Amino acid sequence: MNSTCNEWLPLGTTLALITKKYFGVLSQSLKHLELDRNFSVLLLLDHENRAVSQQYIADYFLIDKVQMVRIMDHLSKEGMISKKLNSKNRRAHLISLTPKALKLIPEIKKAIVQINKKMFSELSESNKQLLFESLSKISTKLDAEVGVPMMMQLKPVQKAKSKA
């Protein structure tokens, strides 16, 4: 994607490309940490300031179960989260930050502030406010769309029929 936004592309594609670039810059600025991705999950857990279910995280970020398991496995392997059985639902886990992750949160937040400051440096405060208001309105309209699922429902690949 070049630096201009093209109206012939779906808005979601444009936003996805911007997102990839943003997280690329964030990952690069935090490459010295032991964690290379999933910063948003850590920030959500920090914001909640309590243990939350995997389902809560999945619902918040619109993540399917398979992707959620991969993220939890990665964060657990890196020592960033702890999982405990939910006493109210034995099939569910409660997720919380480890002391190791808590030490990284201020650095992650600092990097985000620096990147955001740089990205918004050429926008006036009113244009920045307008951007967030516009994105919020778009999000609300998408939430209100009837019959449009928030997550793609992938169908299993069907085996080709063998010729007999």
Image: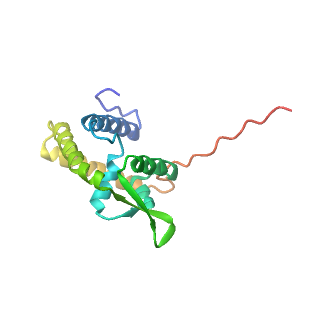
* Residue 18: x %, y % from top left: 32, 36
- Left or right of 16 in this view: 125: left
- Left or right of 110 in this view: 56: right
- The residue positioned 32% from the left and 52% from the top of the image is 42
**Camera-nearest residue between 23 and 152:** 23
- The residue positioned 36% from the left and 46% from the top of the image is 38
* Residue 161: x %, y % from top left: 77, 36
- The residue positioned 26% from the left and 36% from the top of the image is 32
In the figure, 71 relative to 24: above or below?
Answer: below
* Residue 97: x %, y % from top left: 33, 57
Q: Residue placed farthest to the right in the image?
A: 164
**Camera-nearest residue between 28 and 12:** 28
* Residue 106: x %, y % from top left: 20, 50
**Camera-nearest residue between 121 and 129:** 121
In the figure, 87 relative to 46: above or below?
Answer: below
In the figure, 13 relative to 87: above or below?
Answer: above
- The residue positioned 71% from the left and 38% from the top of the image is 159
- Quadrant containing the N terminus is top left
- Quadrant containing the C terminus is top right
